[in-house]
Image: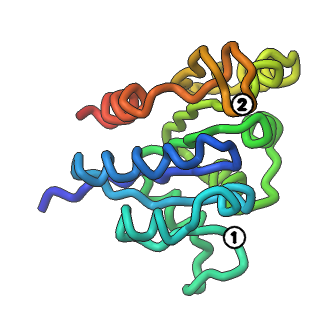
Amino acid sequence: MNEQPLVVLGVTGSIAAYKAADLTSKLVQAGIEVRVVMTESATRLVQAQTFLTLSRQPVVTDLWSLPTWQPEHIALAERAALLAIVPATANILGKMANGIADDALSTFALSQAGPILVAPAMNPRMWANRAVQANCARLRDWGVTFVGPGSGRVACGDEGTGRLAPVEDILAAILARLGR
């Protein structure tokens, strides 16, 4: 039996979080099993129910409401072919680069032994910040794949580099990473 590859999709609190719903739909249509892990901030922008409906899988939003004895982040990490964080805020990039695990997504990221792909999305001034760039350099050195960010107008009206890469580019990078 040919099992579907599992992609864990981390969704963070960037206004671009709504685009992760489109990505989820496209991944499922491509025959990929998608399990979504959302930060609390992400749930204020897009409802977990959206991802439950699109992925047809339970959505993890915190570490404290797990239905089984085994912590979900460990169970998922054992099966995940890829962790894709879309959108990746400065916050999650900093947590990953510095080993901070204080929510479901950052804890899962530390548990993930396989490949990780991130698609940053933030204000251009934040993206250009020395701390953010140092965190990204560290993550690249550790083998994390980056898709974007792109340039253009961001939600606050500023222009520059920091905008989420097009969903099609992120999808192509995920499929390539999975060898599809």
Give the mark toward the camera: 2 or 1.
2
Circle 2 residues within 10 Å: few <14, some 14–19, many ≥20: many
Secondary structure, mark 2, is loop
Q: Residue 122 carries which label?
A: 2
**Amino acid at circle 2:** Met
- From the viewer's perspective, tell me whether residue 103 is left or right of residue 53: right
Q: Residue at x 68, y 27 (%)?
A: 139
The image quadrant where one finds the N terminus is: bottom left
**Amino acid at circle 1:** Asp
Mark 1 lies on residue: 62
Q: Where is residue 63 in the image (x, y as percent from the top left)?
A: 70, 72
Vertical order, 51 against 157 (above or below): below
Residue at the limit of the structure toward the left, as seen here: 1
Determine the image quadrant of residue 14: top right
Q: Nearer the viewer, residue 42 or 83?
A: 42
Q: Residue at x 47, y 65 (%)?
A: 50
- From the viewer's perspective, tell me whether residue 55 is left or right of residue 115: left
Vertical order, 84 against 141 (above or below): below
Q: Disc 2 or 1, which lies upstream in sequence?
A: 1
Q: Where is residue 69 in the image (x, y as percent from the top left)?
A: 59, 85
Q: Nearer the viewer, residue 22 or 177?
A: 22
